[in-house]
Image: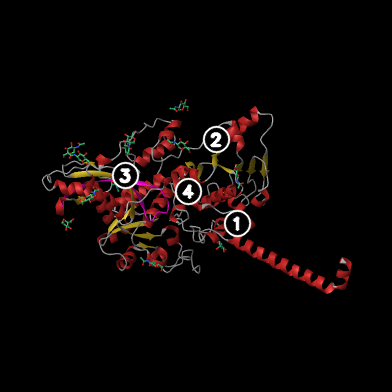
Amino acid sequence: MKELNSASDPIGQNLIKLISNVCFSVFVFTVLIFTVIAITYQPPDPWESSRALTRVFTEFENATFQNDNSVLKTGEDVAFSPAVSPSAMSIAITDAVIEKSAENYTNLTLSSGCEDVSTVNCSGHMVLIAIEKFNMKAFKSILFLEYQTPVNGSKPDECDVAWRFRNKKEKSWRKYRDFRRFRIGFGENCTYKVLSAKGWHSGINARRPRSRVSPSRNDENATLTLGSEINDTIPVLGSDAAFRRRKYLYYSRGGDYCKGMNQYIWSFLCSLGEAQYLNRTLVMDLSLCLPATYTSSKKDEEGKDFRFYFDLEHLKEVASFAEEGEFLADWKRWDKTHKKKIPVRKVASYKVTPMQLKKDKSTIIWRQFDAPEPENYWYRVCEGQAAKYVQRPWHALWKSKRIMNIVSEISGKLDWDFDAVHVVRGEKAQNKEMWPHLDADTSPDALVAKLQGIVQPWRNLYIATNEPFYSYFDKLRSHYKVHLLDDYQELWANTSEWYNETRLLNGGRPVDFDGYMRVEVDTEVLYRAKTRVETFYNLTTDCKDGVNTC
Ligand SMILES: *[C@@H]1O[C@H](CO)[C@@H](O)[C@H](O)[C@H]1NC(C)=O
Ligand SMILES: *[C@@H]1O[C@H](CO)[C@@H](O)[C@H](O)[C@H]1NC(C)=O
Ligand SMILES: *[C@@H]1O[C@H](CO)[C@@H](O)[C@H](O)[C@H]1NC(C)=O
Ligand SMILES: *[C@@H]1O[C@H](CO)[C@@H](O)[C@H](O)[C@H]1NC(C)=O
Ligand SMILES: *[C@@H]1O[C@H](CO)[C@@H](O)[C@H](O)[C@H]1NC(C)=O
Ligand SMILES: *[C@@H]1O[C@H](CO)[C@@H](O)[C@H](O)[C@H]1NC(C)=O
Ligand SMILES: *[C@@H]1O[C@H](CO)[C@@H](O)[C@H](O)[C@H]1NC(C)=O
Ligand SMILES: *[C@@H]1O[C@H](CO)[C@@H](O)[C@H](O)[C@H]1NC(C)=O
Ligand SMILES: *[C@@H]1O[C@H](CO)[C@@H](O)[C@H](O)[C@H]1NC(C)=O
Ligand SMILES: *[C@@H]1O[C@H](CO)[C@@H](O)[C@H](O)[C@H]1NC(C)=O
Ligand SMILES: *[C@@H]1O[C@H](CO)[C@@H](O)[C@H](O)[C@H]1NC(C)=O
Ligand SMILES: *[C@@H]1O[C@H](CO)[C@@H](O)[C@H](O)[C@H]1NC(C)=O
């Protein structure tokens, strides 16, 4: 029957074949389309011109395409979802929350009448509620997270209060602390009212007593107890068994070492991206080389701790890494004490792609980068096809909390109410070929003329700049309250918290507040301004990357 059927109806058979072929083709095509869409999707990247960066780094000697090194955007400056760490989540104190907690106490205050209005009871709840309401009105850019019970100030009508906050402009979930002194009076119906408030960190009685360790020289364990708010101790791998359980991706030092810091970030994030793609622990060298452009000695300086610049505590939370020295020691110890050596896959060239390594079961994948420049740059691993699979985890890289504390201090001292101008000068201003008008457009007179149309007279004006000459902006001082980073030197001077804390990280040796830290602070203060004036687009018509690039 079957044979007869097929023989007598070849047309029907072919038709079915044809239809199924067409269907299959459509299916394959659809899958292909979806795959292409899926692998070409890229998450946001904080560096606007990052696509041109690969070219930038390989032709680094040309000042031409150099990307802007007077600002540094990192993960906390860009919105990533989810922007809130579940473990660190706190509820912001809103007007509704204050009303709710006020309700519980209004009955008490009202019933007490106006007999004892002469004394202010700082620990009474209504004082805190009055202060919360005041802060909410005064600092619109701040999210208040938690308050401590107010304590007595220096006079009977003063109260000191400490709280934690977050700036709405920062996309991270980091919290900062402030404590201020308030003068309390009585309003209508004998309720408390804030008459006046002092500045940033003025409420010294509310400052939490610090249990500090005296930093003795080369005290390795000092870092363990360092500033209770920042826990950026280097994670330990632990026992042999724990060491063996994990799989590692190890990048030897490559040609990026001592190149620009932008290149460092671009390369480091490539290695971290590959480690995440391969589901491996990245072995990290926490010792950086700071290039000469940022050092006071004008020479490359080695041995800079990653933690001077970046937030290791955050990195620990979101990525898996091991410190190189510790890793090598554990590896050596294992190979000494065990007959069976640890399986290692050595990879000589970046041309071996992450996709080819995905199936590799070796405990350690060791990328060696021995080739001559520019074949030995880490970021080359992420070029070409690999770029579709490996994504740079920008959200993992935040600026150091110690740097951000300085940013908060400066913004707090300005009561979060300031405007800022970013003035790019330096090499670009001298290169008339690429930026013909920049020098003139950022001259003191041009700045005065231009800013007057944008920033109200006598506002606080913060100037983020790579112009080294402090008095360069003096002409603006007859129009604005000018603030420059150097006005805040006490924040990193040898009497500062920053100085103490970075010294602990540095084995007891003082740390230089270098050019790269300055760029980090300038960037973040700039982003907290109410009105922000940029050099390119706002002050000059020259293009950011040189003539004919915009
Ligand atoms: C780099 O500079 C050289 C000469 O100094 C020039 O020929 C070359 O075009 C420049 N490269 C770029 C990308 O501008
Ligand atoms: C108000 O008081 C009630 C009971 O005394 C308590 O459960 C509630 O948490 C309080 N609300 C606030 C906002 O303090
Ligand atoms: C406050 O007083 C009102 C009326 O006297 C009463 O209804 C309310 O329950 C009281 N609130 C509290 C939290 O005691
Ligand atoms: C101040 O307020 C707190 C909390 O309401 C109360 O425990 C304390 O007795 C008050 N002190 C004075 C001197 O009234
Ligand atoms: C705070 O001041 C009030 C009155 O001014 C006083 O009664 C109280 O004892 C003081 N509290 C502390 C903790 O010193
Ligand atoms: C004072 O109390 C009166 C009546 O109880 C009320 O109408 C008024 O709104 C209150 N004023 C304030 C500022 O709370
Ligand atoms: C500090 O480190 C030394 C070795 O570096 C160790 O012997 C000592 O027990 C450590 N002290 C503490 C308190 O951890
Ligand atoms: C710091 O974090 C590590 C984990 O990375 C943890 O083991 C350690 O207990 C923490 N130290 C403090 C003082 O919180
Ligand atoms: C990643 O590795 C860990 C252990 O190293 C394993 O538990 C986990 O299942 C792996 N995840 C994927 C997606 O392979
Ligand atoms: C801090 O530096 C000043 C000069 O810059 C010096 O006189 C002073 O002794 C230093 N203090 C400490 C504690 O190192
Ligand atoms: C820094 O450390 C010194 C010496 O240990 C100490 O006297 C000083 O109070 C500390 N400064 C700050 C701001 O913590
Ligand atoms: C700066 O220029 C940009 C782009 O032209 C514009 O959107 C922005 O409003 C300008 N800023 C100021 C403060 O004028």
- Residue for badge 3: 490
Which numbered circle lies on residue 237? 2
CA–CA distance in space, label 2 to label 1: 30 Å
Ligand 10 shows up in which quadrant of the image? top left
- Residue at 67% from the left image edge and 41% from the top image edge: 362
Mark toward the start of the polypeptide (2 vs 3): 2
As measured in the structure, the alpha-carbon distance from the residue carrying label 4 to the one carrying label 3 is: 25 Å
On the picture, is 20 further left or further right than 533? right
Q: Quadrant of residue 177?
A: top left
Q: Nearer the viewer, mark 2 or mark 3?
A: 2
Q: Residues within 10 Å of mark 4 (few under 14, many from 20)?
A: some
Which residue of the protein is positioned furthest toward the bottom in this rendering?
Answer: 11
Residue 387, disc: 1
Badge 1 vs badge 3, beta-carbon distance below 8 Å:
no
In the rendered image, residue 419, in percent from the top left (x then y), is placed at: 32, 60
Please report contact status of discs 1 and 4: CB closer than 8 Å, yes or no.
no
| Residue 173 in magenta stretch | yes
